[in-house]
Amino acid sequence: MKNINWNEVPDQVEFDRLMPGGYVCEMKCVVDVPAKEYLKIEYDIAEGTHKGYYQELYKSKSFWGGTFYRSYKEKALPMFKGFLTAVKESNAGFVFENQEKRLEGKLVGLVLAEEEYMGNDGKVKKRLYVSAVRSVEKIRKGDFNVPELKKYNPAGSRDGFYPVDDSLSDDDVPF
């Protein structure tokens, strides 16, 4: 093993996991992906006990966990307009003018919900996702709903189980 001065290595930082709920957030970095017609938006918690959560996570783990996407494809334009309305209601005098960088530094209300997914290690895990965008005022008033946990459902399965293949006989099964 290489020689490491353990006195210079910072202690591991434990993080309370964010819980599903409504959060007032600041959009930190907005990147347009024109080939796919969406904006990639990195955000952080702007108020409350978890203020700066993703910045601290990044400092500790070199991972930015607060990201969501907003499509501006033709069929998604009403949802994109709803997103812009929430931003306008949350930031007096905000004008978008199709310039994504104007969103940086702006506040918005995000409803975070949980979903299950298959991890690289083959285990079902949970993560947060942005389920809704609301005005900051609605988040502060508690005027939002958090969806139930989205259960992991493998592709091609129904309710997490694969349909029984009745065409096989017991002789076809190798065990």
Image: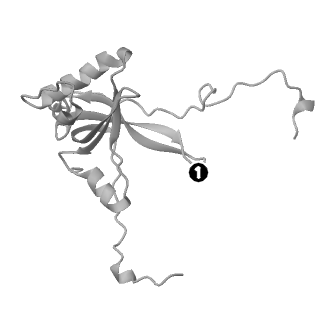
Q: For the residue marked with disc 1, what is the amino acid?
A: Asp
Q: Secondary structure at mark 1?
A: loop
User: Which residue occupies the foreground of this view, 77 or 129?
Assistant: 77
In the current view of this chain or complex, which residue is farthest to the right?
A: 171
**Quadrant (top left, top right, bottom left, bottom right) of the N terminus:** bottom right
Tell me where residue 171 appears, x and y as whole percent: 93, 31
Please count the marks in the image.
Answer: 1
3 over 27 or under it: above or below = below
Tell me where residue 102 appears, x and y as whole percent: 17, 34
**Residue sitting at 33 percent across and 73 percent down?**
10
The image quadrant that residue 59 belongs to is: bottom left
127 over 87 or under it: above or below = below
**Quadrant (top left, top right, bottom left, bottom right) of the C terminus:** top right
User: Which residue occupies the foreground of this view, 109 or 151?
Assistant: 109
Quick check: 17 left or right of 29?
Answer: right
Quick check: 11 left or right of 27?
Answer: right
